[in-house]
Image (cartoon, helix red, strand yellow):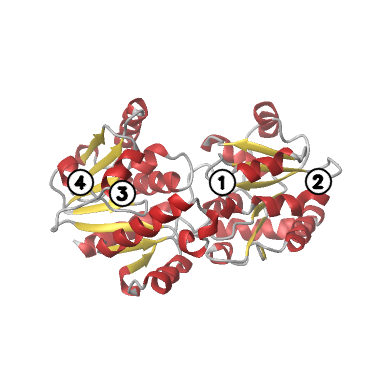
Amino acid sequence: MRIAIDYTSALRQGAGIGRYARELVDAVLATPALHDFVLMAAKAGLSAHWRHEQTRLLGLAAAPERLRFRGLPLTDNWVARLWQRLRVPLPAEVITGGIDCFYSPDFVLPPLRSRTRALLTVHDLSFIRHPETFTPALQQYLQTAVPRSIARADFILADSIATQRDLVELLHVPVERVTVLYSGLAAGFQETPEDDERGRLQARYGIGARPYILTVGTLQPRKNYIRLMQACDPLIASGDLELVIVGRPAWLAEPILEAAAQRPHTRLLGFVADADLPALYRQATVFAFPSLYEGFGLPIVEAMACGTPVAGSAVSSIPEVVGDAGLLVDPLDVDGWRTALQSVVEDSALRAELRGRGLVRAGQFSWSRAASQWLALIANIT
């Protein structure tokens, strides 16, 4: 069987969907399977990075001789403009060559020939549940392109039962067309600290001299960072505690940046390399995830695997991921967040209990398990 995978998000996005795509593809390629794979990516401006990724993937693939790469001399924005906005009927097979199945890990499908089966991952329906957290142009694009791609897909992968329910309820997708595929945990996210990692964090990011509350995710309204800052204000006012936010600015980030600028003990680190994330998690007193809506919430699993107590929002997929291993708080309840975070900061017994539960819970998420499930689904739809 010849399978094409859209690798564009993996190539161009450092976090979020990019991380999901990289980890899943890595695990799939490392699994012995009798398939040929073609990875297609919009590589304009990233040719050196694309060559590096090809070398890396060939090195980890169980059958490198069955792996091929096809690059489009366009940016991802131009690809979206041509295939999704203008709907140019140029099938992806013109780039990939003949294929049996096409997989997109990033919400939308390109034009495909009628005989090609299509598998699509829809991570969440936040653009329907919380349209106010998107720019009008982005919300309109997603409202059009995503349902259209869902209608064309033979099967859909959802990150969680919560997303599966949303697909059925909001877009009337038959439940039998949607399979839940949980994300896994990348290597390196574990509880054992490295030598002098606190000193390294101080030297590289200027944090670690004081205890800190950590949160991770792009700076955009859905992440609910302003309420988190408000909840932390009385906790960090003395300067004995900091709030550290990891993530690059995305759409509608200006109010978040302004709110952080007014708070001397709130630190914005921007995008942080994957190699530094485990240390940031391990050295945090508590990890807060106050999002208004998530399709999964991978940082929760990463934090738990690093032995960090977790407090997350009691909405969408987050309780499903946290299980009994963390505190759950109404994302709109600033006082509730303040109380929850203060209890973890001040109660060492609670921290120890959440740490133990989190380590057990994180062990239930595996990229190798996700890859096996993905390959089984591929076998069933072709």
Q: Which residue is mark 2?
A: 236
Residue 273: give x, y in percent of width and height: 53, 34
Q: Would you place residue 262 above or below residue 136 in this image? A: above
Q: Nearer the viewer, mark 2 or mark 3?
A: 3
Q: Are marks 1 and 4 in contact (CB under 8 Å)?
A: no
Question: At x 64% / y 45%, what residue is drawn?
Answer: 255
* Residue on which the image places disc 3: 85
The residue at the point 80 percent across, 57 percent down is 347
Of residues 351 and 226, the one nearer the viewer is: 226
Specify the amino acid type for callout 2. Ile
The span from disc 1 to disc 4 (Cα, nearest Å) is: 33 Å
Q: What label does residue 252 carry, if any? A: 1
Q: Residues within 10 Å of mark 2 (few under 14, many from 20)?
A: many
Return the mark for residue 92. 4
Q: Quadrant of residue 139?
A: bottom left
Tag 2 or tag 4, which sits nearer the N-term?
Answer: 4
